């Protein structure tokens, strides 16, 4: 052990600061003990007790700094002493800490008008309530709230004239800003209100691709039009679009509402001063009596809305004869089934409808017809269309729009089934989606095709890409990557489903 | 709820749709990043479960605060 | 808002009002037995923290109690004093039960002069003993007792005369200036102590005291940078007491420790203490001392944080930050965080470093439990064993359990079901 000391004259430092310096010196390798103190009488006695009583310490005064070190060797001690100035200078300040609560955030951002909530379901309701009570609109991505909680929150929002988008709301575009999973689309004259996130996404991208734009795209959460919730958020959204000077056409998009809700909603829509195009996936014609135009797919809704503002929609007629024939020719005899592996629940639902119209009954974990509920969501049978974003797949893991793992595995699993002819896939671009949805699944797609080919068959992969050229992933790049891998890409989810249905017709 | 009573929109909703979102984000930070990338003002909350995750206390707090 | 929430909000607003309208004035320095009725007769010693029996007291507090027994002349030797205490011949009680507070061991006995602070806004009084660096850390040596004797015989009577000469010394303006000058009034009182010395200097000389007594007292004041902690704590106690006893209020009106337990009291929950084991102080030790020697958190001085000073205004006293090697950013962050767990702010006490925002006042147990943010306290560290002076200083947080228990206690008391 070596004892070394040093006196620096006229070097006043705050005593608390010096305590910190002493501690840091003691943390240096090889340093047993360190005392960095002003040479007051008390401290000199202390130093003496520790074995430091050199004359220069005795001679020092209360404005002089004494550094006393006990270290393994003389070298270590001198080395540390040599770096004393570094220890005597202050540390760098750390980064700013974030607020921990909604209230703390509002102190820092009092002009906030929206709370975006994607917390675990059981914590989301109280936070949403707190936000509404503080006069914030809410974008509630979280799901798993009870009907009672949702109703109570929406009654509060409705009473206050605030917008509660959700629960289970994945998409909105407000004043040109995308919330949640949204695509980059131009602003324009068409307004939408949707209880389906991916439905809203496809609608907005199709409007954009037709050269028109979106004024506001408001999500309401998947349960809003049920008879329990009675469309409370839809009503607020409707009021917003009616008053919004930019909105010229209003397009509600949803699965069929509850009967009571529909009964009250229709007159309200019919009263609208602006033209309304109702997009109701799978509505039975006899359930709805109205003068308003009613369509069954996002593609048709976009086309009608675009026409109403004086634009021209993308032509929906495609000559499929050749591609159909080419693909069909390559199947082996026993290949007959469609397997849809969807990230977008609405695309899965719509596909079931389209197949049904063509006389094809498909099994699903989110079935149109309860008789065709898949007994085991992880195992397909016959024609099967799976919603991989459904709760049983997303419990405790990211959504398939972000994480490809489960879809990858399912693609390979389907390739093992000798009776599978067609894989039907959706790809969703935009904010918050994965940076390369196509790229993530291409290896699995290629491998699946190879496996089937090695058995002497042919796996036809049919896809649609929901996105625009302005999305970070770039529509054209994603489409080309698919086409280069031999995937047939259609311009909308409805078309992809129709194409798939026609591929297996008569088999 | 679906009566003829006039639904008055809160000023915060009118501001939201006319001037755009000014947001507080509770949850996935990717949502805040996406908002920032679009030039919207957003503040991320470093959220932790209330009552340090104690369910009983959390329920009690819902009634008191 | 629900009826329950409204009641609580209203009660808390009243508690906050109480705290921010306080007008503490130092009116006297009197022997404790004269002004604290419980101490008027019998062998009794008050101590800091929530209630604790002799056998459970920590080493430093025991030492301090022994010192008071010797100071009062109830025993001639430390051994005799210990025997008396073990036999239960001396009654012990918490300062808080008698309108008093004391730093570290906080021991007050009948002949010890205490600061008497009157809250002119409500008429209530609070008492605090003086701050010194030996006996209140558990030192019962003759040197420690000598200093107590000097206080009792020379300095306290002199200051009493000076305060009377002044007709009372309003503390609010002094405190406001000290906060602006970088004090936080718990560990750092340099400015406040100087301002106090300035204020009593002339009255001391005008009071007609013997010259030696006046000089000795001034000398003590001038060389005692933490002197003002005594009046500050009494002022804080006098400020907090009127906020106590408000039905439905969830505001904390006392935070205190005895080296064994940390305890809090809540306005709407009467005299009940909510306690948990005293935490370790996270800080720095003077050269020569190690962590193993440090005692646990002790003292009534957290009364300063209870009214929004001390740790709550670290942003204005960055020098204290060095206690844990912190930065100015961290100090600002502490002060910001305290706003998340308090009812409101003080219009009179403002922090320049935080753009002159008012200090955060009125700790709300609901907000503490909800956010998990506990109040930040900066404090001195005593030795585990009696007989040593202060060995360091640092930051400490009360145990969250105290606030959780208090919240459950609130639900039980006001019949709020789960």
Image (tube, coloured by chain):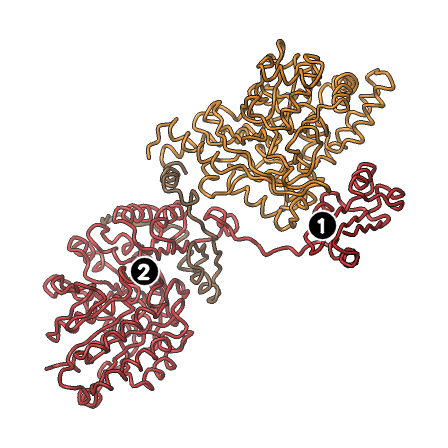
Chain colours: A red, B brown, C orange
Could you say which quadrant of the image residue A82 lies in?
bottom right
Q: Is residue B24 left or right of residue C223?
A: left
| Residue C171 visible | no
Single out the mark in the foreground, 1 or 2. 1
10 Å crowding of disc 1: few (<14), some (14-19), many (20+): some
Task: Pick whichever, C158 or A171, lies toward us.
Answer: C158
> Where A82 sits versus A319, above or below?
above
Task: Pick whichever, A305 or A230, lies toward us.
Answer: A230
Protein chain holding label 1 = A
Rendered location of residue C219, percent (x, y): 83, 27
Q: Is residue C20 left or right of residue C7?
A: right
The residue pinned by badge 2 equals A219
Rendered location of residue A436, percent (x, y): 39, 75
Numbered circle sitting on residue A299? none
> Where A173 sits versus C375, above or below?
below
Q: In the rendered picture of this protein, how many numbered marks are placed on residues?
A: 2
Q: Quadrant of the N terminus of chain C?
A: top left
Q: Is residue A346 left or right of residue A287?
A: right
Separation (CA) of disc 1 from disc 2: 65 Å
The residue pinned by badge 1 equals A32
Q: Residue at x 14, y 73 (%)?
A: A382
Which element type, helix, strand or loop, lies under badge 2?
Answer: strand
Q: Specify which label sits upstream in the sequence, 1 or 2.
A: 1
Rendered location of residue C309, percent (x, y): 62, 36
Protein chain holding label 2 = A
10 Å crowding of disc 2: few (<14), some (14-19), many (20+): many
| Residue A50 visible | yes
In this view, the residue farthest toward the top is C41
């Amino acid at each position: 052990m070596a004892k070394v000391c040093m006196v620096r004259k006229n070097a006043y430092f705050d005593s608390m600061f010096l305590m910190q310096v002493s501690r840091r010196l003691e943390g240096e390798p090889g340093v047993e003990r360190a005392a960095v103190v002003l040479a007051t009488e008390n401290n000199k006695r202390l130093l003496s007790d520790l074995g430091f009583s050199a004359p220069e310490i005795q001679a020092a005064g209360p404005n002089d700094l004494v550094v006393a070190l006990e270290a393994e060797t003389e070298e270590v001690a001198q080395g540390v002493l040599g770096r004393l100035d570094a220890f005597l200078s202050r540390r760098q300040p750390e980064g700013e800490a974030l607020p921990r609560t909604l209230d703390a955030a509002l102190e820092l951002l009092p002009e906030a008008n929206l709370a975006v909530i994607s917390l675990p379901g059981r914590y989301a309701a109280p936070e949403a309530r707190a936000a509404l009570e503080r006069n914030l609109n809410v974008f509630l991505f979280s799901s798993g709230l009870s009907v009672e909680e949702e109703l109570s929150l929406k009654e509060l929002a409705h009473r206050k004239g605030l917008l509660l988008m959700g629960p289970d709301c994945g998409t909105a575009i407000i004043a040109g800003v995308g919330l949640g999973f949204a695509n980059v689309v131009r602003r324009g004259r068409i307004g939408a209100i949707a209880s389906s996130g991916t439905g809203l996404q496809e609608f907005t991208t199709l409007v954009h691709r037709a050269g028109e734009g979106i004024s506001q795209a408001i999500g309401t959460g998947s349960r809003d039009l049920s008879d329990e919730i009675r469309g409370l958020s839809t009503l607020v959204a409707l009021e917003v679009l009616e008053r919004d000077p930019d909105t010229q056409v209003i397009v509600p998009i949803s699965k069929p509402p509850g009967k009571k809700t529909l009964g009250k909603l229709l007159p309200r829509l019919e009263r609208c001063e602006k033209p309304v195009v109702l997009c109701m996936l799978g509505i039975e014609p006899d359930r709805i009596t109205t003068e308003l135009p009613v369509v069954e797919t996002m593609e048709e809704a976009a086309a009608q809305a675009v026409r109403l503002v004086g634009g021209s929609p993308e032509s929906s007629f495609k000559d499929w004869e050749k591609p159909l024939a080419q693909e069909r020719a390559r199947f082996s005899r026993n290949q007959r089934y469609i397997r849809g592996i969807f990230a977008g629940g609405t695309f899965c639902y719509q596909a079931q409808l389209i197949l049904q119209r063509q006389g094809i009954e498909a099994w699903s974990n989110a079935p149109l017809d309860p008789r065709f509920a898949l007994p085991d969501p992880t195992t397909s049978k016959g024609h099967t269309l799976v919603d991989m974003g459904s709760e049983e797949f997303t419990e405790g893991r990211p959504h398939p729009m972000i994480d490809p793992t489960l879809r990858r595995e399912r693609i390979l699993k389907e390739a093992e089934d000798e009776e599978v002819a067609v894989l039907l896939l959706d790809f969703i671009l935009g904010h918050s989606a994965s940076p390369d949805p196509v790229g993530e699944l291409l290896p699995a797609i290629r491998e699946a095709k190879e496996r089937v080919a090695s058995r002497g068959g042919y796996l036809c992969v049919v896809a649609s890409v929901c996105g625009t050229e302005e999305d970070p992933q770039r529509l054209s790049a994603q489409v080309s990557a698919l086409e280069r891998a031999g995937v047939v890409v259609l311009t909308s989810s409805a078309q992809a489903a129709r194409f798939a249905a026609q591929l297996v017709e008569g088999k | 709820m679906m009566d003829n009573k006039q639904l008055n929109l809160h000023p915060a909703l009118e501001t939201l749709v006319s001037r755009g979102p000014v947001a507080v984000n509770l949850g996935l930070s990717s949502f805040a990043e996406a908002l920032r990338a679009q030039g919207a003002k957003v503040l991320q909350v470093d959220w932790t479960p209330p009552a340090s995750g104690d369910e009983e206390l959390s329920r009690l707090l819902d009634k008191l605060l | 808002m629900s009826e329950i929430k409204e009641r609580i909000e209203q009660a808390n607003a009243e508690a906050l009002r109480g705290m921010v309208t306080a007008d503490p004035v130092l009116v006297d320095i009197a022997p404790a037995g004269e002004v604290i009725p419980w101490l008027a007769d019998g062998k009794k010693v008050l101590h800091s923290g929530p209630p604790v029996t002799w056998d459970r007291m920590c080493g430093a507090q025991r030492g301090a109690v022994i010192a008071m027994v010797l100071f009062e002349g109830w025993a001639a030797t430390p051994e005799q004093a210990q025997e008396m205490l073990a036999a239960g011949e001396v009654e012990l009680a918490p300062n808080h039960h008698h309108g008093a507070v004391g730093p570290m061991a906080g021991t007050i006995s009948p002949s010890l002069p205490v600061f008497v602070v009157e809250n002119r806004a409500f008429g209530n009084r609070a008492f605090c003993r003086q701050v010194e660096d030996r006996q209140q850390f558990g030192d019962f040596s003759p040197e420690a007792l000598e200093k107590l004797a000097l206080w009792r015989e020379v300095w306290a009577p002199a200051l009493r005369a000076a305060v009377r000469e002044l007709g009372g010394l309003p503390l609010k303006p002094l405190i406001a200036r000290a906060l602006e000058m970088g004090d936080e009034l718990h560990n750092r009182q340099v400015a406040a102590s100087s301002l106090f010395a300035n204020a009593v200097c002339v009255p001391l000389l005008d009071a007609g005291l013997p010259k030696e007594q006046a000089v000795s007292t001034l000398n003590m004041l001038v060389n005692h940078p933490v002197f003002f902690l005594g009046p500050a704590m009494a002022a804080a106690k006098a400020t907090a007491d009127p906020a106590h006893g408000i039905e439905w209020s969830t505001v904390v009106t006392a935070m205190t420790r005895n080296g064994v337990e940390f305890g809090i009291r809540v306005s709407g929950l009467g005299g009940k203490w909510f306690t948990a084991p005293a935490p370790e102080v996270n800080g720095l030790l003077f050269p020569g001392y190690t962590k193993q020697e440090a005692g646990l958190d002790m003292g009534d001085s957290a009364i300063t944080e209870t009214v929004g000073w001390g740790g709550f205004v670290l942003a204005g006293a960055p020098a204290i930050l060095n206690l844990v090697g912190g930065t100015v950013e961290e100090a600002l962050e502490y002060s910001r965080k305290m706003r998340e767990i308090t009812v409101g702010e003080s219009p009179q006490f403002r922090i320049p470093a935080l753009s002159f925002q008012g200090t955060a006042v009125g700790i709300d147990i609901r907000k503490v439990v909800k956010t998990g943010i506990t109040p930040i306290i900066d404090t001195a560290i005593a030795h585990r064993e009696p007989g040593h002076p202060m060995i360091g200083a640092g930051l400490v947080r009360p145990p969250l359990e105290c606030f959780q228990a208090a919240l459950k206690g609130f639900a039980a008391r006001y019949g709020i079901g789960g």
